[in-house]
Amino acid sequence: MDEQLIQAVTELNEKRVIQLVKEELKIGRDPDDLRQLIEAGMKKVGEIYEQGGYFIGDLIMAGVIYKEVLKTEGMTPPKSKAKNKAKIVVGTVEGDLHDIGKDIFICMLEASGFKVYDLGCDVPKERFIEKIKEVRPEIVGLSGIITPSLAAMREIVEALEAEGLRRQLKIIIGGHAVSQDASLMIGADHFTKSASEGVAQCEQWYKERMSAVERA
C-alpha cells in the first residue's frame, strides 16, 4: 500500500489518496507513517517539476491534496498538552503568493503547541521586522515556492542583522525553492521541504533552549 499511496500523490490523484488514507486508518495505521508517505509523494512531484514534467500549479495541487488529507478524521496531528512552547513568526516572502505549504506547516506547529503568528503571503521585509520586534519570537519561518523568493529571504535576514535581531532568532526556510546552498546563501539556520521535518527541527530548538535555561 505504501507505494500505492506515494504513487497516488505523485499522480495528483486526490480521490485515490483520500481513499487509501481512510482505508489505512481503519486498520490502525499510524497517521505519522501516512503523513511521511504523502510527503514522499510530494517530493517526487517536486522532482518531476524540476525535470520539466510538472508546472507550478502541480506543486500547488500536491499541497492542496496534503491539506485535504489533514482534514480527514484521524490525520490531524494530536494537540500537544504543552501550550505556547515558543513563539514563531511565519510568512510567505514578498513576491510569492503561495501559502499552502506554509499553512500545512502552521497547522502542524500549532498542534505541537507552538504559538504561531501567521503574516500571510507576499510579506515585505518591513512587516517581518515589525512583527518580530512586537512579539519577540524565538523562531522565524520564511516560505517560498518560486526561485525569486530566495533573494527576498536573504533581504529579510540582512534586515534582521541590521536591526540587531538576528542573534536571538532561529531561522527556518521552507518551500520548493529552498536547498542547502540556498540556505547558506540566505544565512538561515535550517531548510526543509517537509512540514513534518520542519516541525521536528523547531521541536529540537525548543528542547535545546529549555535545556540551556535549566543549566543557567
Image: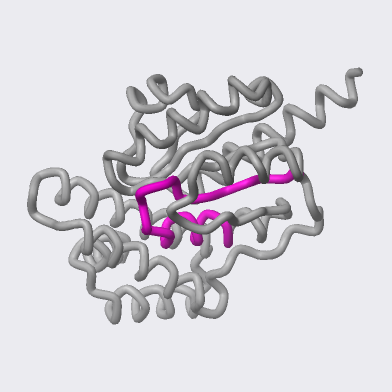
Can you give x and y, in whole percent of width and height, for residue 64 in the image? Answer: 36, 69
Of 163 and 20, the residue lying toward us: 163
Can you give x and y, in whole percent of width and height, for residue 203 in the image? Answer: 66, 40
Q: Residue at x 39, y 44 (%)?
A: 193
Of 201 and 106, the residue lying toward us: 106
Can you give x and y, in whole percent of width and height, for residue 39 in the image? Answer: 37, 54
Q: Is residue 164 magenta?
A: no
Q: Residue at x 30, y 62 (%)?
A: 60
Q: Residue at x 33, y 48 (%)?
A: 145
Quarter holding the N terminus is bottom left
Of 86 and 43, the residue lying toward us: 86
Q: Is residue 216 left or right of residue 29?
A: right
- The boundaries of the magenta stretch are 86-107
Count of number-bearing discs: 0
Quarter holding the C terminus is top right
Please tell me whether residue 29 is drawn above or below residue 169 in the rendered image: below
Q: Is residue 90 magenta?
A: yes
